[in-house]
Amino acid sequence: MDLAVGSAPDSLLLDEALCRLAEIDERKSRAIELKFFGGMTIEEIGKVLGISVATVGRELRMGQAWLRRELSQHPA
Amino acid sequence: MNSSTKISRWKLIQEIFEGALERQPSERSEYIANACGGDDNLRSEVESLLFNDADAGAVLHSLIATDIKDLEQTSNSSEAGLELGPYRLLREIDSGGMGVVYLGVRSDNQYFQIVAVKMIRRGFESPSLIQRFRAERQILATLNHPNIGAIHDGGETKDGRPFIVMEYVEPQPITEACASRNLPIRERVELFRSVCSAVHYAHQKLIIHRDIKPSNVLVTPQGLVKLIDFGVAKSLVPELIPGGIPKTETFQRLLTPDYASPEQLLGGELTSSTDIYSLGVLLFELLTGSRPYSLTGLSPGAAERVVCDPEIRKPSSVRGLAASTRKELAGDLDRIVLTAMDVDPARRYHSAQHLEEDLVRFLQGKPISARKATAAYRLRKFVRCHRTAMVATCVALFVTIGSLVYYSWQSRRADARVKQFQTLANSTISDMTEKLQNSSASVETRAALFQSILKYLEQMRQTSGNDPRLLLELSKAYSRVGDLQGSPTVAANLGKPDAAKDSYKMAAALALESHRRLRDDESTRAAIDAYYKLGEIHSTLGNSPDASDSYRHALLLATDFSRQKPNDPERKRLLVMNYSGLGFVEFEDLQTDVAVKNFRSALETFGDNATGDLDHDRTILRLHWLLGLALNELGSQTDAAANLRTSISIAQNLAKKISVRPAGQTKRFCALLRNRRTSRRIRDAQSGGLQTGPDVRSQRICNRESTGG
């Protein structure tokens, strides 16, 4: 279940998970990309996606939990 | 479940998930049970998300950070320093995508020896690749010949990748060895005999090399030939290889098509004669310094002609050969090469030994065995060749598909995400630009947003190298940051022209680099634009030499750009902007005569007449006005008056229209007209009572000195 130390999922796994998320909910997937890969703040993500700061927060929270679960279910 | 129910269920999950988060942990369980109303599936979905919520951010952050680091390592980092048994890896000496060769040293109490260690690159190991590696190791172990790179040892790394320890041969390909030593033809033939001997030996052991090309045929400093890299070699006795040999198709190795035999490119049955063909190509290159043909980028029709025409492939027919060389090649050597390279495998030399024997006969001046091409033979060959039109078509197709497979394989793996980020970055940038330009956000916010985009792009640049498209996007981002920091023409800015100057400088350098590699319209436009802006800001800062430099840079590019499409108004505009900018700097700098030239060039490009287009007319108004002032200084009063008069009439026409234009433009325009000195000059010009040149000039010099400028 848990992600063991040193066995980080490879980029493929992460990529797949993000793509699956994008299929279900594109905005969440994009918000996560902008946060983690783009290093943007919540305000910046809001600007890019054209949504309020509060909405960004909600999108990220659910999206992250979902992604975290996906990655735990497919340990590397 | 159809998509709309899916979406509404997803929304429901989110609703309950968020509802639960708003409550105290102790109340959540009850809340979820109520909200889900007996839907166990829904309930477990929400619960598992909640379970993963607590540390999701932190875990993802560390995972993605590691992931990006891993990516960098697989693509960049070397395993130098790694100890494999008694061997220590020193540095990477060759790399072919999935495989990598290290220079290594054996240094234990036994002996000291320099070796080459070949292994699979970390992160690229796959069962089929590992199997192929073992096959290569087994093949090498059966080969023991002075002209074949010897295997010393083998084993597996701690993470299960097989490695091969081989004799280290300084990587000088046979073609380079011959060229650098400037060997005469006969000595090249002598050297080539060793290659034949090595290949023949392998054939006797029932092993086909299948990838004979200069980079696999090395020459030691002592002048000894070493055939290396049996990575795609095939044993004709499969039982030799434990576990069998993986099929070639499964590992999609890109052959160098120029050395591959037609049947090899077609994927047909391979025999030792495929190596004979490659030997022929290699001999051709050794004798003439060039390859018989290059199939890369050829149309099927052209490829067909190339493969079929025996005249083209005669070594002695290569262009640019010295007359003496041509004479030496014509006849026997031509025939030997053509026989080795016959399209029909059955017509080639039956073995590498036969090829070598014919070369010996040539060296000894005896009649060679290769048949002379009679007219009848040529006709037969011609007919057969046209039957192989299909072959040639397939060759071209194979090459294309091969590279596609290779590149898609590459991009699918390690850098797939990086590529996606690039796309994302590009779309983000253009999205943001649009939104930001129309946004009511403060200048500060917009500048900060662009800074974050910049940081993002710079990071990307470090991870993914200097992709020219990325450089272009970076350049545009820098340019926008510059605008916001202190563009002289963008009203809302932070008032930091020095910072803007630095940003424009970056923008210009990046655009130029991108332009150098892409040479497309977009990168050209970006480079011109960046240099123009740099010129403007230098000019604003009173830095004339740098301003002129920047405008000249832009002009060079713009002149070329406009020449490609002389009637394109956009390109004309770019040219005019820079002529006028440069002229203005020169005018301010009291180089009035060169300034006049540039104003004139601008007007010639744009045409002197007003067109009714506001921007166009405003530009020529300004140009006529500046030209008039400059000509006055030079003492050409008649010309000066004419230009000033033109500018006044354009201004009068514009003033009528401008009353309905947005406030900003009107204000600027009125300021221009209200300028008292200007009005006085215009009045003077109209009445013909213009001050003489030198006086105006000295007056300007005085003005400059009195203002300290």
Image (cartoon, grey):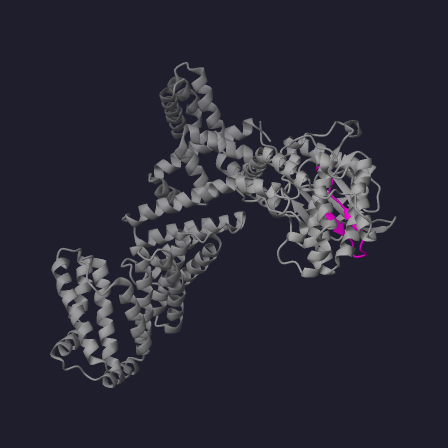
Q: Is residue B469 left or right of residue B195?
A: left
Residue at left offset 64%, top offset 52%: B317
Is B658 drawn above or below residue B389 in the view shown?
below
Q: Is residue A32 above or below residue B213?
A: above
In the image, the segment drawn in magenta is: B216-233
Front-most of A5 and B165? Answer: B165
Q: Residue at x 87, y 50 (%)?
A: B111
The image shows a total of numbered marks equal to: 0
x and y percentages locating residue B444 in the rendered image:
33, 54
Q: Residue furthest right?
A: B110
Where is residue B672? Give x, y as percent.
Answer: 19, 68
Q: Is residue B664 left or right of residue B363?
A: left
Q: Nearer the viewer, residue B97 or B294?
A: B294
Measuring from the top left, give residue B552's x and y in whole percent. 39, 67
Any part of residue B123 in sight: no
Whether residue B56 sits left or right of residue B295 in the image: it is left
What quarter of the picture does the C terminus of chain B occupy?
bottom left
Residue B627 vertical position relative to residue B464 in the rendered view, above or below: below
Image quarter of residue B678? bottom left
x and y percentages locating residue B5 in the rendered image:
37, 20
Query: Is residue B491 visible in this depiction of the protein?
Result: yes
| B545 w.r.t. B134: above or below | below
Q: Classify the position of the N terminus of chain B by image quarter.
A: top left
In the image, B24 versus B262, the foreground residue is: B262
Figure quadrant of residue B3: top left
What is the magenta segment's predominant secondary structure?
loop
Q: Residue at x 40, y 56 (%)?
A: B524
Whether residue B232 is in magenta: the answer is yes
